[in-house]
Amino acid sequence: MKLLQERILRDGNVVSGNVLKVDNFLNHQMDIELFNEIGKEFKRIFDELKINKILTIEASGIGIACITAQYFKVPVVFAKKAQSINIDGAVYSTKIESFTHKKTYDVIVSKKFLNPDDRVLIIDDFLANGCALAGLIDLVRCAGASVEGIGIVIEKGFQNGGEMIRSMGVRLESLAIIDSMKTEDGSIVFRKC
Amino acid sequence: MKLLQERILRDGNVVSGNVLKVDNFLNHQMDIELFNEIGKEFKRIFDELKINKILTIEASGIGIACITAQYFKVPVVFAKKAQSINIDGAVYSTKIESFTHKKTYDVIVSKKFLNPDDRVLIIDDFLANGCALAGLIDLVRCAGASVEGIGIVIEKGFQNGGEMIRSMGVRLESLAIIDSMKTEDGSIVFRKC
């Protein structure tokens, strides 16, 4: 998505530890006009799939998921990072290892909100090592529902998450895939689509 | 807001501990059509105030804030619940006590995203004891920006948060104010507007 790549080049910052900071438009301050263009693009890509629910994970996926949901006219469910003490039989739960926080979370969705007949589109802002996505896929499958597609805003193509998720046979589309980036000069190279 | 009150009566559940569960349309599964009506109503109420930024707090405020922001054509910033270890000089921080989790969080906003000339609308899903809101107001004031208004979806009028925030001289508007609710029979009484 050209508009997104331009925005990453203009406002993104490559910082040490393989981190791309896009907190001025994507995951701290959020540019809602850009989110609308992202939502339209996800609708164009996944239009045929009869999606009836969008699933994301708190916190930074929620804004994109909600704006996108308007184009699909479906509800959004967000998976919650839980304190283990809250987990009971009324939820599906999985464990997700956080790349940023070097920590393992229990992540839950109430059983009321994922059903066997759901055709789910998973939306998230970032894909790096794929742990969050693998957890969300696990939650959907626990419910007997189907993951029809996964829409990611920025994929770090030089980490193994994209390959791991695609090898599961799931349709994964990322609006920008970064093949390499350098802290020294801030350069970012996108994969050709 | 009549549509919202009807929805609370239809789908809300009063559970023990003075908790109103509205997780099937507001803060776990999110009804985006309803969010659009909420966004339009906030725009109608706060239209005159030359808002240039919406501030909310993760996680459940984000969806409503993003949908609402479309009507104001402004960006959204969400305050993050931080691990203390991340707090440095580049952020405004405050402490918020959570009613639900009986725990105190450090909450931060990057200094890049709150400026003295910002005219901020704070949006959140719930107002109970007002701790989260007081924290958000504190963050805005730390930045030298002004809180022009606060838009809340559901206020528990029988807790003291609304009175506390209004006594600070801030314009606070809640789309539904619950004056009383009973676990025994699930009854909910709204304040007349």
Image (cartoon, coloured by chain):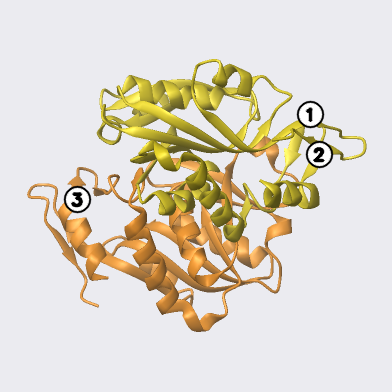
Chain colours: A orange, B yellow
Which of the labelled discs sits on residue B30, or is there none? Answer: none
Which percent across, then down, holds residue B30?
61, 54
Which of the labelled discs sits on residue B17, or is there none? Answer: 1
Residue occupying the point 26% across, 26% down: B116
Separation of residues labelled 2 and 3 (CA atoms): 45 Å
Determine the residue located farthest toward the right in the rendered image: B185
Residue A89 seen by the camera: no
**Residue wearing tag 2:** B14
Q: How crowded is mark 1: few (under 14 residues within 10 Å), some or many (20 or more)?
A: few
Decide if residue A191 is on the left or right side of residue B52: left
Residue A19 seen by the camera: yes
Separation of residues labelled 3 and 1 (CA atoms): 46 Å
- Chain of the residue on which disc 2 is drawn: B
Q: Are marks 3 and 1 on the same chain?
A: no
Question: Which amino acid, by three-letter code, is at mark 2?
Answer: Val
Determine the residue located farthest toward the left in the rendered image: A185
Question: Which amino acid, by three-letter code, is at mark 1?
Answer: Gly
Q: Give whichever of A17, A155 is nearer the camera.
A: A155
Separation of residues labelled 2 and 1 (CA atoms): 9 Å
Which percent across, then down, holds residue B173?
57, 33
The quarter in which the C terminus of chain A is drawn is bottom left
Decide if residue B10 is on the left or right side of residue A157: right
